[in-house]
Each structure stands twice: as C-alpha cells, then as structure tokens.
Amino acid sequence: MQILILAGGKGTRLRPLTLHTPKPIVPIANRAFIYYQLDLLRPLNVDGTLEVLLSLSYQPRKIEETLTHEELGGITIRPIVEPHPLGTAGAMRNIRSRVTGTLVVFNGDILTDIDLRPLLDRHRARRAAATLVLVNVADPSAYGVVELDAEQRIRQFYEKPAPGVTSASSINAGIYLLEPEVIDLIPDGREYSFEYDLFPRLLASGLALYGEVTNAYWLDIGTPERYRQANADVLHGRLRRYPPESSPSLTADGSLVDAEATLKSGVSVIRSVVGANCYLEDGVSVVDSVVLAGSRIAEGSRLSSSIVGRGVHIGSHCVLRDAIVGDKSVVTDFSRLG
Ligand code: GTP
C-alpha cells in the first residue's frame, strides 16, 4: 500500500508560525503534526508493506530531521524533495515512477480520524479511477465544492464558489484515492494544481470519478484559528483516536502543560497548551491559547485566543488577544497585541 503525503507547501496563511517551522511539523498538543497523520495511516500497514512517500519542497530538512525512528512504528517513509515547488498535482507526477497501484494522497495539513479501509474497498469494487473524500461544511465558499449525482459520481467541481453558484455543500477534504492512469494526465516537470488544473482535466477525461462524503472528524489546520482549534480538539478528545483519558497530563482546566515547563505562583492556564521549557512568571494567565516550547512570559501578562511561537519573550503586564507571535520575538512590557 502506498500513501503520498503532500508536505511541500509554504503555509503562508499560518505565518509567522510557519516561517521557521513547515506546516507538517508545527506542534499540535506538543507533538509534531505529521505524527497524527502517521497514526491514522498505521492501521493500513497490515502486512508491513505500507510505504509513505513524503513530498517535500519548503524547508525539507526540518521535516526529515523531525521524523525519528521510534515514532514511526514500522512504517517506511520515503522523503522526496522537489527540485522546485510543483504544486499539489505536480507533486503526484513527480513520484509517478514509484507508484505501483492505488495511491492514497493526503494533504499534509488535514487532521482527521477517518477510517480509509471501507473507502478503499468501495473504490476498488467500483473500479474507480479516482475517489475524492468529501466533507460537509456550513460555509463551503473558501473550499473546492464537489457536486455528486445519485450514484456518487462526480458531476461538477467549483473552486471557492461565489454564493448561489451551487447548492452543494460537500467540499474536497484533500484526501484522494487515485489509480496511476490519473497521475498520467499530469504534465511532467512543471507546477500543476490539483484543484485548478487536474480537476477540470479529469472531468473532461470521462474516467470514473467518485466522491465519498465522510462524517469523520476533519479539520484543515492551515489558518491560525484552525490551528488553535486543532490543539483544542485533540485536548478535548474530539477525535476518536485521542480520547481525553489517553492524555493523563491534562490538567483540571483542560490544558496540556509540558512536564518541563515552569509555572510560578498564581499562574492560570485554561484550555491551553504550554510547551517544554516555558517559564510563566507570577500571575500570568493563558486562556484558549498555544504557547510553544522555550517561551517566557513575564509577570502579570494575560493571553487569550493567541499563539506564541518558540523561544518568545513576552514582557510583564502585556495583554494579547487573538494575537500570533512568531518564533524568537520579543514583546516589550505593557504591550497590547491583537
Ligand atoms: P497556504 O500557503 O497557506 O495556502 O498553505 P500551503 O502552502 O500548504 O497550500 P495549501 O494549503 O493549498 O496546500 C495543500 C497541501 O498541499 C498542503 O499539505 C501543502 O503542504 C501541499 N502543497 C502545496 N503546494 C505544494 C507543492 O508545491 N509541493 C508539495 N509537495 N506539496 C505542496
């Protein structure tokens, strides 16, 4: 079984967090994001032949260095660094010579607890060329919307449709089951997008294309709001795979505070994540926020709905609300951000 994780994007919407940390390894609940995807794929490794192809382009070494042997648990990972960014479909074309059968493609920014096995069974039973996983969302206007017919065949695709263009609310979840003939439609050696370039070509090709709507937990972690949401959802057990009881380090206030963080007197941390070697001085309060490793917050500062990168120094009596502070930044005393 072969999986391709598309992990080469620049993650611009998650800046400044992604300036020094590519999106596939930003920490979610103090653990590099890519491990959540590998957890999901592990059950597919029934016969020990699961091969995960990791297509990289932006800061590839940092991703490769993060993947440690113990955490991989018997999965073979093959990093493939692109000569230049090839886009979501160009990345598939780039690994075509390695593909031996059905390829499962995963966007490298999807947090989900979907079970892929029944989808693979139906994909094969229907002899589909491509099956797209879809999720229903309340506001599909920021996504690729997919219209299906009664047999679940894909009828039309609208990328970020204006209101009223379609009544469909199923969006492309960034998980595809593809046969090699689909990859053959992608031109070699140039940037090519799944959404804008390959999809219209696929519709015109007459190949059997199906959509599968899933009710599983699904979140694209690619914006600051959704990044915080992903941390909160893992903490609060909203993914079946990570029930709260599996996290004995959760505090009574629903927070995850690394054992190597120091909290001085009167510190309150509520529904938040605090990373290793953080130092929170007297009276600091952190609510609905994520503070990454090695950051220091001086006395009396208050953070809510904020993200603090690695090695940040926040001075005393600051107020951060809906703020995002990049790695190694210094925020001076009495600042107001957000
Ligand atoms: P934004 O810049 O915030 O849009 O994020 P992004 O760069 O990750 O782009 P987007 O969210 O559209 O990408 C969807 C998935 O495709 C992510 O997992 C990206 O890592 C991946 N991706 C995007 N562009 C490339 C590329 O050129 N090469 C590879 N290998 N992956 C890519």
Image (cartoon, rainbow, N blue to C red):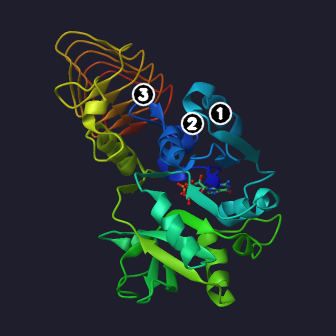
Does the closest atom of ligand 1 sit within 8 Å of the Cβ of label 3?
no
Query: Residue at 58% across / 25% down in the picture?
Result: 70
In the image, 37 versus 231, the foreground residue is 37
Secondary structure type for disc 2: loop
Instruction: Report which quarter residue 62 is drawn in.
Output: top right
| Quadrant field for ligand 1 | bottom right
| Label located before the other in sequence (1 or 2) | 2
In the image, 121 versus 145, the foreground residue is 121
In the image, 191 versus 323, the foreground residue is 191
Does the closest atom of ligand 1 sit within 8 Å of the Cβ of label 1?
no
Mark 1 → mark 3, Cα distance in angstroms = 17 Å
Residue 228 position (above or below residue 223): above
| Label located before the other in sequence (2 or 3) | 2
Q: Which of the labelled discs sits on residue 21, or is there none?
A: 2
Question: Residue under circle 3?
Answer: 292
In the image, 299 versus 154, the foreground residue is 154
Q: Which of the labelled discs sits on residue 62, or is there none?
A: 1
Amino acid type at circle 3 is Leu
x, y percent for residue 10: 61, 49
Secondary structure type for disc 3: loop
Disc 1 and disc 2 in contact, CB within 8 angstroms: yes
Query: Residue at 45% across / 19% down in the picture?
Result: 294
Residue 211 lies left or right of residue 261; in this view the side is: right
Amino acid type at circle 2 is Thr
| Label located before the other in sequence (1 or 3) | 1
Residue 17 position (above or below residue 335): below
Q: Bin the neighbour count of mark 1 within 10 Å (Cα to Cα): few under 14, some 14-19, many 20 and up.
A: some
x, y percent for residue 39: 48, 41
Amino acid type at circle 1 is Lys
